[in-house]
Image (spheres, rainbow, N blue to C red):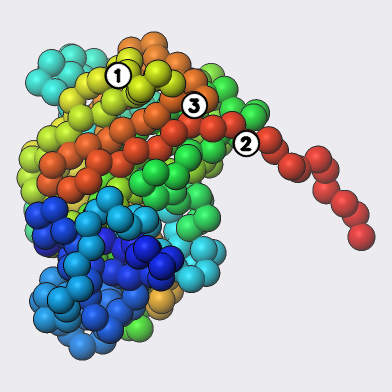
Amino acid sequence: MLLIQFKNAAGERRVGIIEHEAIREIDGFTSTYALGQQAIRSKTGLAELAQASAGSTEHAYANITPLAPLDHDDAAHCYVTGTGLTHLGSADTRDAMHKKIGGDAETLSDSMKMFRMGVEGGKPASGQRGVQPEWFYKGDGSIVRADGEPLQMPEFALDGGEEPEIAGLYLIGDDGQPYRLGFAIGNEFSDHVTERQNYLYLAHSKLRNCGLGAALLVGELPDHVEGTSRIYGVDGQVRWEKAFVSGEQNMSHSIANLEYHHFKYGLFNRPGDVHIHFFGTATLSVADNITVLPGETFEVEAPAFGPALRNSLTVEQSTFTKVSSL
């Protein structure tokens, strides 16, 4: 099932089910958040509740304004985080990576050490703890951009590049238990040039906007997900395109292991909070020496997630000057 949050022609928030070329409205709920809360409190599956609450009103996708598939009324109660060095990539990339991480661990860079640790211990047996992944904080709900909204690169950034990824979307129940509502396609937009200066700049490079596709895939993530990442020039023509893969078949960590090492912190189990957690990628245009320019458009598409995610790149001026003393 694919759920979607949107605004109708009158500008009213709604939530619905994507069915073929139409969106069927869900009665009694105006947000995925409210639907998820009711599912948790009534101990009902999200898909089951959505299907039981579906009404007769339908909309064409072209006539609605898509919203992010999950949000919180107070952006400060939505954490956006992620993990890196989790994907094996294509067969060629895997072979190259395994050659890089072979031999003496002391000769490896920190990144390659972390990648090898994931390959060796990122998929533990059920009930066991696997190796910790790389982890980063990206921002709160204010940084999330829906399909069609621009990704704003601060003027002090050295780069604005896409990262086509899958994100897990979570709601913390009244009992302090994390509940996964499902998955969405995303663009975990980052500053790769800043990161390449020194890996300790990773934290800075991640404090950026991100895009989330309109659809929330309810249920388990397929073991193999295929998609395509594209960059369109200001003339509307494709100037870069590459396939990407995700799902546990293409990852060095299991989803359960990535989730454990995020939600093991009590800070992230506050009732009512929302979490958007990106799972990583192995496909980047910057790796092909592509510099995305303001006015150009990113597209991340994966058939399993319905409508493609498209966001243009803009530059935003920083308003901060200095701290004032009281």
Instruction: Give how far across and how far down residue 30 sits, in percent.
Output: 34, 75
The residue at 44%/48% (across/down) is: 145
Q: Amino acid at mark 2?
A: Glu
Instruction: Give how far across and how far down residue 234 sits, in percent.
Output: 43, 21
Q: Residue furthest bottom?
A: 42
Q: Label 2 crowding class (10 Å Cα cut-off): few <14, some 14-19, many 20+?
A: few
The residue at 13%/42% (across/down) is: 303
The numbered dot on residue 140 is: none
The residue identified by callout 3 is: 295
The numbered dot on residue 316 is: 2
Mark whose residue sits in front, 2 or 3:
3
The residue identified by callout 1 is: 238
Q: Label 3 crowding class (10 Å Cα cut-off): few <14, some 14-19, many 20+?
A: some
Instruction: Give how far across and how far down residue 217 sits, in percent.
Output: 18, 57
Q: Is 151 left, or right, of 213 in this rendering? A: right
User: Taking the image as drawn, is residue 298 in sight?
Assistant: yes
| Alpha-carbon span between mark 3 and mark 1 | 13 Å
The residue at 33%/70% (across/down) is: 14
Q: Earlier in the sequence, mark 3 or mark 1?
A: 1
User: Taking the image as drawn, is residue 106 in sight?
Assistant: no
Q: Is 292 left, or right, of 259 in this rendering? A: right
| Alpha-carbon span between mark 2 and mark 3 | 12 Å
Q: Residue furthest right?
A: 326
Q: Label 1 crowding class (10 Å Cα cut-off): few <14, some 14-19, many 20+?
A: some
Which image quadrant: the C terminus? bottom right
